[in-house]
Image (tube, helix red, strand yellow):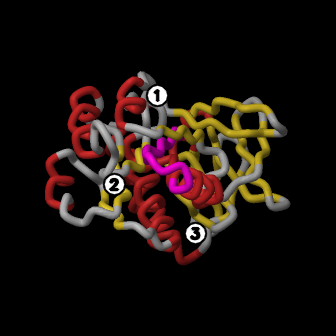
Amino acid sequence: MRVAICDDEKNIRELLEDKVKKLYPNARIICFSSGEELLLFEEHIDILLLDIQMPEINGMETAVELRKKDKNMILIFVTAAEEYVFQAFDVGAFHYLVKPVNDEKLAQILNKAVKELGSKGVGTCKNEDKYLMINSGGVHIKVMLEDIVYAEVFNRKIVIHKMDENIEYYGKMSDLEALTGDDFFRPHRAYLVNLKYVEKYDASTIYLEKGNVIMAKQNYPEFVKKYMKFMQKRG
């Protein structure tokens, strides 16, 4: 997940960067000091935190130019100027936060943005090409979502189980759940399963092509509903 922060004030950039890092330690964060600098950046941005009151090209003008080349980027204005809130709708802003930003509110909006990102797919919009980047033992690993059979929490780590290997990393299951989207289901607080690999299930267990996971009784009706919808989608 690539998060960009654009603000002409260095202390604000560093403050926001620190807050995002604490919420999403595996995210790649890029900072820009001006709209001009941001517009020269050619890589895709998943989530952008953008100030409005900046010299030369302001944030609203920057957003207009950005939208010409990227319709899917999640745009969140973080600004002291309240008067641009209605213009924000014209550039498809996801949210409009007024400085000083409350930590709880920022976390709430970012979590919603990450869930939205997960529903769109991470890295690309083609279903079979969705992926996430994780840091395992200091090594950055690209993991294709379609290759994840299930994930579990074990010894304060997340273990991703693929058909041919297991990968461990430090992270939050809630973050992974938000990124994986509708093809995954969390039947128990310790597990997240890829519906693609489900072979059979009952009210207490989901049997996968590799391994079994526990089903929390209260989650069983929702699992059945989601699995039926998944199978219908696959035809």
Image point (43%, 25%), residue name: 41
Residue 150 picture location, percent across and down: 65, 47
Q: Is residue 105 above or below residue 121?
A: below
Q: Is residue 130 visible?
A: yes
In the image, which disc is placed on residue 82?
none
Label 3 element class: loop
| Count of numbered badges drawn on the protein | 3
Give neighbour class at mark 1: few <14, some 14-19, many 20+ (Cα, 10 Å). few
Q: Amino acid at mark 1?
A: Glu
Image point (35%, 59%), residue name: 79
- Tell me the quarter of the image containing the C terminus: top left
Between marks 1 and 3, how big is the CA–CA gap? 30 Å
Image point (31%, 59%), residue name: 95
Label 1 element class: helix
Mark 3 or mark 1, which is nearer the start of the sequence?
1
Of tags 2 and 3, the one toward the viewer is: 2
Q: Quadrant of residue 101?
A: bottom left
Q: Residue under circle 1?
A: 128
Q: Residue under circle 3?
A: 203
Image point (52%, 71%), residue name: 103
Depth order, front residue of 160/176? 176
Q: Residue under circle 2?
A: 77
Query: Residue lying farthest bottom?
Result: 218
Task: Indicate left or right for 127 with 137 as reference.
Answer: left
Q: Amino acid at mark 2?
A: Phe
Q: What's the magenta region?
A: 1-12
Q: Amino acid at mark 3?
A: Ala
